[in-house]
Amino acid sequence: MLTVYWHEPPILTSKEVRFERAFKHKIMADSLATTTLLRNQVIEAFAHPTQKDLPIVAVERYLGSLFGVITAIKTGNAQFAGTCLFEWGSPLCNNAKFAINSIDYEAVMVLMGYAYALGNAAIVVAGPLQSQDEPQNADEISKEVVTLFRRAAGVFEWIGENPLKQILPTPTRPPELCPQFVSAMADISLGQAQLLAIQRGRFKQNSPSLLAKLSMGAASKFETARFKMQNEVPAEWAALPLPFREFVQASELHTKSLSLRFMAQLASDETRGGDAVAYLQAAIDTLAPIAQMRLQPYLSSAINLEKTETLRLLEVAKRDNDSIYFARVPSIATLPQADAIYFSKSIPYMCPSPIFTEIK
């Protein structure tokens, strides 16, 4: 089962932007009015995040016009008639409003919503994979889900390398303007893609060695994401909603536990009974901090199922070791850990061409 976090797209809270009224010259008024219309459609689409394609299509239709406005401003072919504030509510700050005089801020928030929507679409598409019965088109579903997560990662990376760098520091900022947060979201997206690869690998009975390495790769992505936020920008991390922080921490611990469990399976296959017991006990110990977390029900259920199965395997391993192998149970610190391997890389985001380049 995928352990995923449902990202709410950023939602515009109050201030409307009328591009056709924001510039000194009016020759491009029709194109600017269309830009306003497309922006309004994006805001409406963001209010319905569970509709898989609606936010994605709305953003893709808007971006050509938005980048047309940005290009015109950057090349000196347009100038705002006065201060033009773009106001967004951040879902990771209880929808607190942040109004900034920057067209690049508009690009960041729209693209963040786009990346969130890609992740949401992946979760919707993955729905049939959560059932007990394997759908006939499971491989096709898995491929689409992984592609969506990889696309989301590419968008997050592009935001950090492009419009985010153009925004001047502000006294207060939403998490979406924190480079460490944006970079961490790319890692989380790839970690989620890797979780699906592990799920498919288990169903296809891939080798425990491969599954242990894939699990460690996913754990590495979640751990890196947590470190970037918790250690590099601790104040911003502390301000994020508790369910989001606990999702990141629980996903890291869960995937580390999975890696240990697969290492136990490998040890058992190689008749190393004592090692198998040590790995499984470490897998249970790794999950212990999750008991103190107030996770969303579906996430808590998924991890509890894994814990229950790991406890069952531990009982079997202890019984076999006591009756068959009679091996000493070593300290987990003395046993090798799986090397991390990565199934997925981000799909680079291709910025759309501006529909127009000057506003005369």
Image: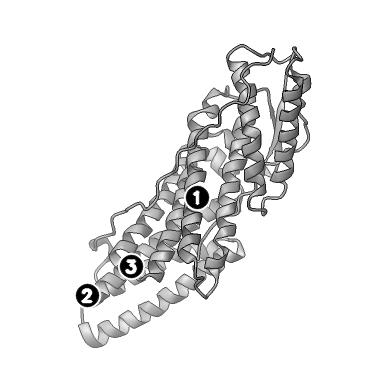
Mark 3, residues whose alpha carbon is within 10 Å: few (<14), some, or many (≥20)? few
Marks counted in the figure total 3
First-in-chain label (2 vs 3): 3
Foreground mark, 2 or 3, reads 3
Front residue (pair 257, 73): 73
| Horizontal arrangement in the rendering, residue 128 relative to residue 87 (left or right) | left
First-in-chain label (1 vs 2): 1
| Horizontal arrangement in the rendering, residue 319 relative to residue 44 (left or right) | left
Q: Residue at x 49, y 41 (%)?
A: 229
| Residue 134 against residue 93 in the figure, above or below | below
Q: Which residue is mark 3?
A: 206
Front residue (pair 118, 13): 118
Tell me whether the residue at label 2 lies in contact with that at label 3, contact meaning CB atoms closer than 8 angstroms: no
The answer to which quarter of the image holds residue 235 is: top right
The answer to which quarter of the image holds residue 63 is: top right
Q: Where residue 351 sits: x, y (%)? A: 53, 32
| Residue 212 against residue 156 in the figure, above or below | below
| Residue 92 against residue 213 in the figure, above or below | above
Q: Where residue 222 sits: x, y (%)? A: 44, 51
Q: Residue at x 41, y 49 (%)?
A: 221
The amino acid marked with disc number 3 is Asn
The amino acid marked with disc number 2 is Arg
